[in-house]
Image (cartoon, rainbow, N blue to C red):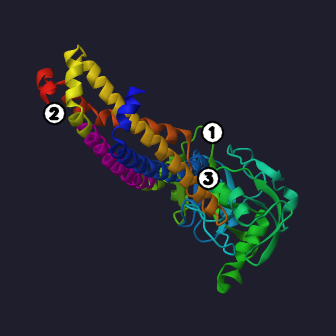
Amino acid sequence: MRMLRELGRRRLRTSLTIVGIAIGIWALVVFSSMANKINALVDGGSAYYANKVAVSDGGTAGFGGAPMQLTLIDEIAPVDGVDVVVPRIRMLVADIAGVSFGVPDQIVAEPVGADQGRETIATPVAAGRALTDADEGTYVAVMGSTIAGKQHASVGSTITMHGYDFTVVGILETTLTAPDSSVIVPFSTAQELLHEDLPPVIRDRTEPSDLASQFIVYPASGSDTGTVAAAIETALPDLSAMTGAEYDQSIGSSVSIFNSVIIGIGLIALLVGGMSIINTMAMSIAERTREIGVRRAIGASRRRIVRELMTEAGVIGTIGGLIGVGLGALVVVLANELGRSAGTVLFELTPSTVLFALAFSTILGVLAGIIPAWSAARLDPVTALRHE
């Protein structure tokens, strides 16, 4: 209580210092939540591409390049180390406006059961059902949670993609990764959509059933994915084979830079708050010089003086941290709710982020109070008693 009374004697100065810390923690929470969202997307991709090889015609990690002939399976399958080859189609949901942060809305399709049980990552269906072999050739869809919310879709709803009406038969559970922005349709139906998007000169010479945009290769047991990828590119030099390690290298480095920038912004704001604490504690000590001299004269040890003053600084940091976390959480929740209808969920606030922010603000306060506290403890009691 005495400590709170001491802080209350300098209400304006203490309040301004707390506001400075709160702003820094607010920035740290908001930017860290943004980094969490990006990391979740990247981690989802890393988990998906681990222990497999994505083969495309000049595409990227998210999408295949130019459409390829389905018959390429017969050329990829005999390559040494290849166990299972799954044709896959990825294409933008062009008729649905809006883009999810980091991952665009996309149509995803592959033949049901084509992975022969090799795929270990599955997204459970929260409502309705998953696709089956019986759905081939029909216009049905299973939607990710984010894109379903954006379209206000539910099981039984109708959505329009690429000029065709699809009946929603299932909604996936929320993953906070790419499946949330995906629409899964039957493979043969996706082939028709991909065929429609081809230039007329190519479309007239191609059948929809001949197309794929990507092949997912599962290596044989004991085979190295890098070795398998190199063997595929050697056998089929016109194709590009990407491993999970290459995905992490290409995407992870960019994300690391982005994370460093946004966390750096938050830390700069906190540095300003730390300087405010040093100033507040230094002024407090100057005002309490005589009091500190009396306490030293009646036997208070230097260690006790340092401990009490550093505790005051820590309390300032903790109060500022609590306010900053509260403001940051409010901004994250409001921003996500406002953006949810447009499929733009920018932030992911985790318990670890909250605990880190509170611990950081408290430790910052304690460290910022070291210099003023040590200066106070070194005051000569006689000199301090004469101070006016």
Which residue is rendered at x = 11% and y = 25% of the image?
383
* Amino acid identity at mark 3: Thr
Mark closer to the observer (2, 1):
2
Q: Is residue 267 magenta?
A: yes
Question: If the image is split into quadrants, where does the C terminus sit?
Answer: top left
* Amino acid identity at mark 2: Glu
Relative horizontal placement of residue 22, taking residue 350 as reference (left or right) = left
Which residue is rendered at x = 55% and y = 39% of the image?
351
Q: Is residue 378 magenta?
A: no
Inspect this view and state whether residue 227 appears: no
Question: If the image is split into quadrants, where does the N terminus sit?
Answer: top left
For disc 3, the neighbor class at 10 Å (few under 14, some 14 to 19, many from 20) is: many
What element does badge 1 sit on?
Answer: loop
Mark closer to the observer (3, 2):
2
**Cβ atoms at labels 3 and 1 below 8 Å apart:** no
User: Which disc is residue 177 wearing?
Assistant: 3
Q: In this picture, is 375 found above or below 22?
A: above
Relative horizontal placement of residue 164, taking residue 62 as reference (left or right) = right
